[in-house]
Amino acid sequence: MNETIDKGRRQLLTAATTLTGAVGVAFAAVPFLASWKPSARAKALGAPVEIDISKLEPGGMLKIEWRGKPVLVVHRTPEMIGRIGADDSLLADPGSNASRQPEYARNPERAIRPEYLVLLGVCTHLGCLPQNRFTPGASADGVLTASWPGGFFCPCHGSTFDLSGRVYAGVPAPTNLEIPPYSFADDNHIVIGLDPVKEA
């Protein structure tokens, strides 16, 4: 019995089998590699979140979520920065000694760069959401008086905070608003949940 081997056909079948196997491996690898990325749940539990601040106008604020809590980023104007410290005698903790913030935010502005305030938008009294009331003077609803210097106001129980998130004395909130760990990836991006890299 004489069998002739068709080498061309064998090469074609080998190539087709190899190609099919490679495509199968690629399809199997995509979900496997995708599983290495942090899930939405993992991000909510603390994975760093990068935000674009390039369109945040001076005097404006944006809110994002990190670890299931609102994070407020305020682009303070020079005039707003100038008002910080004017009412230190009225604050419960002007030096932020009893409050939670990273060491690099332990200054009157409570910030890495004075023009950008990053804080958790959660009142330290009972966890309500403070509102931004940056304009000095009485509010339209009559809650804030003409002496109001601008800052944050918690409508639930009346706690007030200055433009650095420092609590005024005599209100229910016991401490200043918390500053989360954060860093600047570049001039237009802030990373919430990641401390700045220390230079050696």
Image (tube, grey):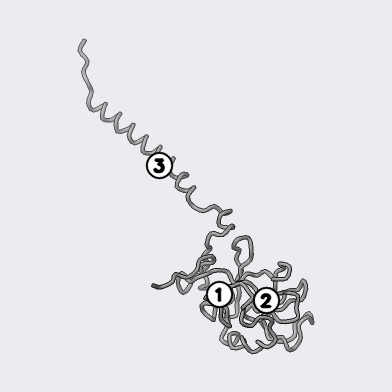
Q: Position of residue 12 (x, y in %)?
A: 28, 30
Mark number displayed over residue 73: none
Dot 2 or dot 1: first in sequence order is 1
Q: Residue 22: percent from the left, percent from the top?
A: 36, 38
Against 114, residue 32 (above or below) is above
For label 1, the residue is 56
Residue in view at x 62 percent, y 87 percent:
85
Name the image quarter holding residue 154.
bottom right
Q: CA distance from mark 1 to mark 3?
A: 42 Å
Q: Secondary structure at mark 1?
A: loop
Q: Are marks 1 and 3 in contact (CB under 8 Å)?
A: no
Residue 86 at x, y percent in the picture: 64, 89
* Left or right for 52, reference 24: right
Q: Residues within 10 Å of mark 2 (few under 14, many from 20)?
A: some
Q: Residue at x 63, y 60 (%)?
A: 68
The label shown at residue 132 is 2
Q: How many marks?
A: 3
* Residue at mark 3 to residue at mark 2: CA–CA distance: 50 Å
Q: Find residue 81 and report its image quarter.
A: bottom right
The tag earlier along the polypeptide, 1 or 3, is 3
- Disc ID at residue 26: 3
Residue type, numbered disc 2: Asn
